[in-house]
Image (tube, helix red, strand yellow):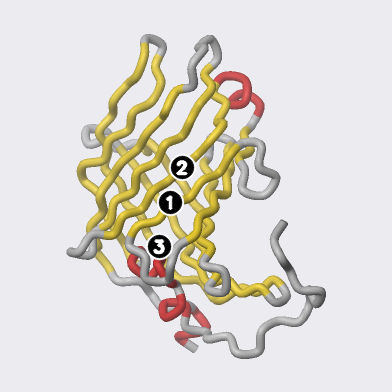
Amino acid sequence: MEHYPDDIYTEPSDVDVDTLRNLGPLRALAGVWTGRRGLDVNPGPDGERRQPFIDRIELQPSDPQTNGPQLLYGLRYHQHVFKPDAPETYHDQVGYWLWEPATGTIIQTLAIPRGQIAMAVGHAAPDARDFTLQATADDPSFGIRSAPFLEYAFRTVEYRIQVTVHPDGSWTYEEDTVLQVRGRAEPFHHTDRSTLTKVAEPTPNPLARA
């Protein structure tokens, strides 16, 4: 159990409204990015399928958020993924990356339009260039929820993402989504990997612009 104060209502009085100055290890992710050589390994009827992909991720700073005394800084993101030889969407994802300076906690929320949401957590130093987050199906806080068909056929039991920021400013994510696929005894590791290069700088959050 986390240690929380008895006063759950009083908000901090000295909040810096400039989110970009207060993102800790997430500062390196702010902006608009493209990846040209992603690889998705997913389950097929006869084993695994390997699919190259191109992705675009936009991460823009949002205004500071408080839960009573808790203070969070964040990036609102949208990830759009498609195959190199096809115009239709291969994967679409939205959510937030959040940083809590007081505890060194990183949170990623995600939602995809196939009926699934998740919230993963990790910890890092403010200047970290490598960090990992995890969610599990049975965690009441940092968990995974899926619509009935996915629970029936492709139940997600664990999600893990590792982010590595490189000296040239690019960054790589490596995801491992552990699935219990109907009809298979062993869990399947559905993996995604991509290295992203910045194509545009972030836009300051509304309070900072004001």
Q: Is residue 112 above or below residue 19?
A: above
Residue type for callout 3: Leu
Name the mark on residue 117. Answer: none
The residue to which callout 2 is attached is: 160
Q: Quadrant of residue 66?
A: bottom right
As drawn, is 134 to the left or to the right of 194?
right
- Do tag 1 and tag 2 residues touch (Cβ < 8 Å)? yes
| Residue drawn at 42 percent across, 28 percent down | 189
Q: Which tag, 1 or 2, sits closer to the chain's start?
A: 1
In this view, 148 is above or below 159: above
Identify the disc placed on residue 59.
3
Say which label, 2 or 3, has the lower sequence index.
3
Residue 196 at x, y = what percent?
Answer: 26, 53
Give the amino acid at mark 1: Thr
**What residue is pinned by disc 1?**
132
Q: CA distance from mark 2 to mark 3?
A: 19 Å
Residue 41 at x, y percent in the picture: 34, 28
Name the image quarter holding the N terminus. bottom right
Quadrant in the picture for residue 38: top left
Front one among 85 and 73: 73
**Tag 3 secondary structure:** strand
State the CA–CA distance, disc 1 to disc 3.
18 Å
Q: Earlier in the sequence, mark 1 or mark 3?
A: 3
**Could you tell me if the residues under marks 1 and 3 are in contact, i.e. CB atoms within 8 Å?**
no
